[in-house]
Amino acid sequence: MRAMLLVNPKATTTNARTRDVLIRALGAAVELSVEETRYRGHAAALAATARAKGYDVVAVLGGDGTINETVNGLLNPVNGTDHVPPGSEGRPALVVIPGGSANVFARALGLPNDPVESTGAVLEALRDGRRRTVGLGQALWEGQSRYFTFCSGMGYDAEVVRAVEGLRGTGRKATPARYVNTALRHYLATDKRHPAMTLTGPGIPTARGLFMAIISNTSPWTYVGSRPVHPTPWASFETGLDLLGLRRMGPMSMASVIRQILTESDALPGGRHLVQLHDEAEFTLTAERPVAFQLDGDYLGEYETVTFRSTPNALQVLV
C-alpha cells in the first residue's frame, strides 16, 4: 500500500521528535512518502498530486485547516490534475492524525486527541482494513467552491475566527481560552440591532433577520478544551447539513443558547429566536451587506451570498 503523509511542521501540538516517531511507525506499515507543507494551499496541491499518481492513502499530521486543504485536494482538480466525480470511488483514502489546537474532525471520527494514540488507532485500522465513508459539506460563493468536513458559519462566529487568526498572525497560539476571551470581547462590540442575513432553500420556509448562522456536517461543531459544543446535535456524516441561526444577540438570548449548546443532549436548542434545519441537501444565506464567512475554522472573507450543499459518501477515512 502506497501512502503519502502530509506534515504541517507548524502543527500546534507536535514537535520534531513526535513527528519522527509517528513517521517511523507509519513507515513500518506502508510504503510511505513524506511531504512537509510550506505555505497556505500547499496541502491541497500535494493531495491532488497524490491522487493523480495513484496513491492508496493520503495521511495528514496537522490541524483542521491542513485536513480541510487535503480533503479539497482529494476532491477538486488542481493544476490540471484529473477530475474525480462525486463519490468516494477512485481517490485515495484519508488518514487523520490530529496535530492542531482543536482537531474537531479527528475527534468527531472517534480518534484520540493525542497524536501518538491516534496513530496507534490508525495503524489498527490499516491492519484490519477498517474504512468509514463520510459525507461532506460544500460551500459555493462568487464562482468559488470549497468542501468542509465539520462546519461553516456566517456572521458572529466567523468574526471571532477572523479576530483569532489576527492574533495568531502576531505569534499567539489559538488556545481555547483565547477563543473564549476573543468571543467575549467581540460580543461587546458587535452590532446586536441590525441583522443582515436571510435563509432560503428548496422547500425551506424563508427566514429573515439572522445575525449568525452555524452550518454543521457533524456534531460536535467544535470544542472548548475537552468540552464539546453541540449547536446542532442531530448532525452527522451520514446525513445532510444542519443549521442553527440566531435572530437575537441580546445577553439573555445568548446566555440561553450557550448554556444549551454546552450541554450534552440529543435535544435541539430551544427558543423562539432560533432558526433550525436538519438533514438538508441545499440552502442559501444572503446578506444585505458583506458578512464574515468561515469554513472549518478558516476565515475566508466577507460575502453577501453563500450556498451550502451536502455531498453524501464523498470520502473514505481509515479509522
Image (tube, rainbow, N blue to C red):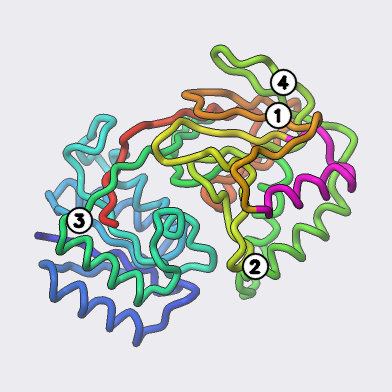
Residue 89 is left or right of residue 217, and the answer is left
The picture places residue 271, in percent across and down from the top left corner, at 79, 34
- Whole-angstrom CA distance, mark 2 to mark 3, is 31 Å
Residue beneath the point at 43% across and 70% down: 99
Q: Cβ–Cβ below 8 Å for labels 3 and 4?
A: no
The picture places residue 199, in percent across and down from the top left corner, at 66, 23
The residue sitting at the top extreme is 203
Query: Nearer the viewer's eye, disc 2 or disc 1?
Result: 1
Q: Which secondary structure is most common in the magenta stretch?
A: helix
| Range of residues picked out in magenta | 246-263
Query: Nearer the viewer's eye, disc 1 or disc 3?
Result: 1
* Identity, as a three-letter code, of the amino acid under mark 1: Val
* Identity, as a three-letter code, of the amino acid under mark 2: Pro
Q: Which residue is mark 3?
A: 57
Sequence-wise, which precedes: disc 2 or disc 3?
A: 3
Element type at mark 2: helix
The residue sitting at the front extreme is 266
Residue 83 is left or right of residue 44, and the answer is left
In the image, is residue 37 above or below residue 310? below
Q: Which residue is mark 1?
A: 275
Q: Which residue is mark 4?
A: 207
- Whole-angstrom CA distance, mark 3 to mark 4, is 42 Å
Sequence-wise, which precedes: disc 2 or disc 1?
A: 2
> Which of the image's four quarters has the N terminus?
bottom left
- Whole-angstrom CA distance, mark 4 to mark 2, is 32 Å
Q: Cβ–Cβ below 8 Å for labels 4 and 2?
A: no
- Whole-angstrom CA distance, mark 2 to mark 1, is 27 Å
In the image, is residue 268 above or below residue 41? above
Mark sitting on residue 176: 2
* Identity, as a three-letter code, of the amino acid under mark 3: Val
The picture places residue 274, in percent across and down from the top left corner, at 75, 32
